[in-house]
Image (spheres, rainbow, N blue to C red):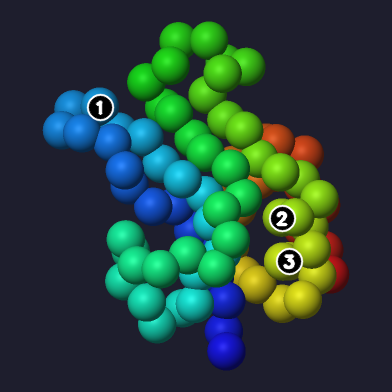
Amino acid sequence: MAVRIRMNLIGKKNSPFYRIGAYESRCPRNGKCLEILGWYDPKNQKTDKQLHVNIQRAEYWISVGALPTHKTGLLLKKAGVRMSK
């Protein structure tokens, strides 16, 4: 089972809001999530309220072989997640 860490769009039109989670690579974008790791709100003006990630769980999924998508990888680095196995 290949696992990807990616974002799931749950916001409305012109108001995006994303959940960051661990998904099986074959499931659709808004499919079943193995575990929710955090959220990302790009419209929030306060930078400390834009991103929330459970760092320990994200590092666990990366350690067992989960690969983040490009944008999600950038957000995880911004949150302070170590990306090495």
Tell me which label, 3 or 1, sits earlier in the chain: 1
Residue contact at pointers 3 and 1, CB within 8 angstroms: no
Badge 2: few (under 14), some or many (20 or more) residues near its Cα, within 10 Å? many
User: x, y percentage for residue 42?
Assistant: 41, 27
The residue indicated by pointer 2 is: 58
The residue indicated by pointer 3 is: 62
Which mark is on residue 72? none
Mark 1: amino acid: Ser
Badge 1: few (under 14), some or many (20 or more) residues near its Cα, within 10 Å? few
Q: Secondary structure at mark 3?
A: helix
User: Which residue is at a point 36% across and 35% down the rendered structure image?
Assistant: 17
User: Which residue is at a point 57% across and 89% down the rendered structure image?
Assistant: 1
User: Which residue is at a point 53% across and 10% down the rendered structure image?
Assistant: 46
Query: Residue 69, can we see it?
Result: no
Asked if residue 82 lies left or right of residue 40, the reply is right
Residue contact at pointers 2 and 3, CB within 8 angstroms: yes
Asked if residue 57 lies left or right of residue 72, the reply is right
Q: CA distance from mark 2 to mark 3?
A: 6 Å
Mark 3: amino acid: Ile
The residue indicated by pointer 1 is: 15
User: x, y percentage for residue 16?
Assistant: 30, 33
Tell me which label, 1 or 2, sits earlier in the chain: 1
Mark 2: amino acid: Ala
